[in-house]
Image: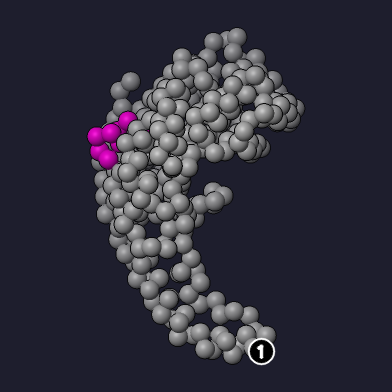
Amino acid sequence: MSVVIQDTFCKSALTKTGIPGADYAINPYTGCAHACVYCYASFMTRFSGHTERWGTWVDLKTNVADVLEEEFCRKTARRRRAASRGAAAAPVQASLSGLGETALPAAIDALAPISILLSSVTDPYQPIEASRGLTRACLEVLAGAEAGMIREVSVLTKSALVARDIDLLQSIPGSEVGFTITTLDDAVARRVEPGASAPSARLEALERLAGRAIPTWVFIAPVLPSVSDSPAALAALMKRAADAGASRIAVDRMNLYPAAVAGFRRVMPPEALADLSAYRSAPRLYADRLRAAVSEAAEGIKVPVRALF
């Protein structure tokens, strides 16, 4: 598959996000060559100026690591000023506390460590990362951050390439790596996520990371109708993830965006579309059935399993 690659520049690297557990996201790329047919981020196409189909273009934010370093320099300076103000205010705070007053709010936000997600609307380890290394450059900046600034760096990917950066991930406090895996069947994966590493390769990478004491987890999302939505299919995937070293598993259903439904129909044979039709006609009933399947599949799995729907 041909992919249009374009160099661009960004004004910011850290983007505030409402994703639970993350304060900021870093997206070194716009677009994604994994070309997953169900991808929720395909909406980015209309903001990019591209006319090509999602999955066939990638914009590289070539200066993203430099911008990230500048942002951390500013955060470091604010943090130091806040620490100084906090120390100066300590005697006043002690007096106010004696009077039953609430704590002074100054400096608290600036001193709080932050959590970062790589990435929210792209895959940080899509194929172009192997040669351009924008994600690795960002990790180098994070690894050099002042102690106490970072609470967590969470990577989410469908690529085995993340194992290349074990050295940096080990040096970043609170780092963890999540692997999105929708099926254990490499052939099916080639249909629905043609540019991503095979599920078997992702699990091997997970095992390598876990073996180096880097926390790992698996995101079964989306659960593919007629492919991975049965208790047996889910249990097999969960067991393989746990055996590879995942510390937890999260599960989410497929979002019925028109583009996702059309993409799934385009690549899957007719016999695989029955559950998709049932899901579309009765989404609540399907969700209840899927929730029960997740619960049944999780029995006997040695790590926590959570349904996110």
Residue 302 higher or lower than 228, as above or below: below
Indicate the position of residue 224 as horizontal and vertical percent values: 58, 23
Tell me if 292 is positioned left or right of 225 in this view.
right
The residue shown at (58%, 26%) is 239
Seen at 54% across and 51% down, the residue is 21
Question: Residue at 40% across / 33% down in the picture?
Answer: 208
Residue 22 visible in the picture: yes
Quadrant containing the C terminus is top right
Position of residue 96 measured from the top left corner of the image (x, y, whole percent): 61, 88
Helix, strand or loop status at disc 1: loop
Residue 302, located in which quarter of the rendered image?
Answer: top right
Q: Which residues are magenta?
A: 126-133
Residue 50 or residue 208, whichever sits in front: 208
Q: Quadrant of residue 148?
A: bottom left
Q: Mark 1: which amino acid?
A: Leu
Give the residue number, with chain letter if any, for mark 1.
99
Residue sitting nearer the eye, 49 or 124:
124
Q: Which one is nearer the viewer's eye here, 309 or 183?
A: 183
Image quarter (top left, top right, bottom left or bottom right) of the N terminus: top left
Choose top left, top right, bottom left or bottom right for residue 235.
top right
Q: Is residue 40 visible?
A: no
Q: Residue at horizontal 43%, vertical 76%?
A: 83
Q: Is residue 128 rendered magenta in the image?
A: yes
Q: How many marks?
A: 1
Q: Is residue 105 magenta?
A: no
Relative placement, left or right, of 42 versus 8 is right
Left or right of residue 141: residue 114: right
| Residue 269 point in image, percent of width and height | 54, 10
Q: Which residue is nearer to you in this view: 189 or 95?
A: 95
